[in-house]
Amino acid sequence: MRYTLVSFPRQKNMLFLRSFMILFLSCITIKINLCFPSTPSSLKTLAIDGHFNFEDVHHAAKDFGNRYSFLPLAVLHPKSVSDIATTVRHIWQMGPRSELTVAARGHGHSLQGQAQAHRGVVINMESLQAPKMQVHTGNFPYVDVSGGELWINILRESLKHGLAPKSWTDYLHLTVGGTLSNAGISGQAFRHGPQISNVHQLEVVTGKGELINCSEKQNSDLFYSVLGGLGQFGIITRARISLEPAPEMVKWIRVLYTDFATFARDQEKLISGESTFDYIEGFVIINRTGLLNNWRSSFNPQDPVQASQFKSDGRTLFCLELAKYFNSEETAVINQDIKRSLSQLNHIPSTLFVSEVPYIEFLDRVHISEIKLRSKGLWEVPHPWLNLLIPRSKIHSFAQQVFGKILTDTSNGPILIYPVNKSK
């Protein structure tokens, strides 16, 4: 099983639990439907810059969840935003009798077939060639990007200008439209909020095929409905995303706890007020042996002797993961800040591990794991996944029941805990 948790400070804080289970279960049913009506000839006559594919559609009946498979009638490969608007408007005008549905598909990372369209039209957003990415520098930098652009490409392009988006997801090989239609949460969310809190403007194709620009001050109802709206209020074709100066390097830190209450209290302490760290997450470790030795390939123990003597003894452990961004000329000051902040925590002293990596390597860290899993044939498996927002008042009882009574033997995937301020 793989869960993702986030802990939040104070009464206004909430805990985001994402449960991601990689299980080989014979009881999982893969839903497949191969029946669909004849191709509406009207789709073939639409004047578009891109093209429809009515035969090679099987790839659009898969997603990362790998539990549902619904064949579409056609896949649209748009070259322009007008292709999307024209198609959606045409289907809207056909009326409900056609029973034709539309789904926007980015990198196919949905979990329950949300980017699939049974007997409908799937729009391949990664085919969208416009608008071209544009980075704007100045006092309030931002980047204009297509809804089908991958976040990893935005990072690479913005770094050329010494800039980067403020808020991320753990995995960067996802499209802008995909994560903004959900939320986009990672370890920076406690400070900057999720990705949807760092968007200035959107261009959206509505369910009627209208192309509308929206922002906090312009068509605000549509703006806030589309952000985190799970694709139910329109298709994001362009986004203006806030940027900030990018650092060169990252101090990446892990420490362990045996007690959840202590772990959660330290997470809350760190995200309250002005935290030293730029990234704060955590994860749960259940019945793992040789854990610290596995970390040695990427992290250096502060005390190698004590770290080598640490035994988990089958206990459930809680790892606090931290990161501090910096530039090379700041190294001495940053090291002092980190030392001072860590001295206020109550982790197991012998389990302090530190790594120093380039900024882009830290942000793209999950992709390295993806490559390893793909090489072992463990990527294309069912991924049941659960996201939960848990209020601070309930997180301790939740942890007691789930970590203390339900998940006691082992876990086949990470259980991630993100502390997030509700006000963000």
Image (tube, rainbow, N blue to C red):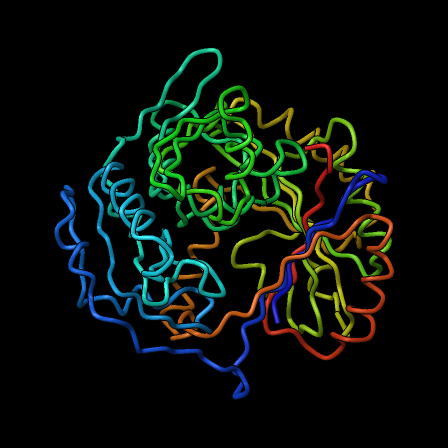
Mark yes or no: residue 243 visible: no
Determine whether, in the image, residue 292 is placed left or right of residue 126. right
What residue is shown at x 55% (from left), y 70% (from top)? Answer: 384
On the image, which quarter does residue 315 sit in? bottom right
What residue is shown at x 61% (from left), y 35% (from top)? Answer: 324
Determine whether, in the image, residue 180 is placed left or right of residue 271. left
Question: Please, is residue 138 above or below residue 45 in the view?
Answer: above
Residue farthest to the top? 139
Judging depth in this view, the residue of 387 and 40 nearest the camera is 40
Question: Please, is residue 247 above or below residue 361 in the view?
Answer: above
Estimate the x, y position of residue 42 in percent, counting from the top left.
17, 54
Judging depth in this view, the residue of 122 and 39 nearest the camera is 39
Judging depth in this view, the residue of 357 and 236 nearest the camera is 236
What residue is shown at x 27% (from left), y 31% (from top)? Answer: 131
Location of the N terminus by quadrant is bottom right
What residue is shown at x 22% (from left), y 45% (from top)? Answer: 78
Estimate the x, y position of residue 148 in percent, counting from the top left.
33, 43
Question: Please, is residue 404 above or below residue 251 in the view?
Answer: below
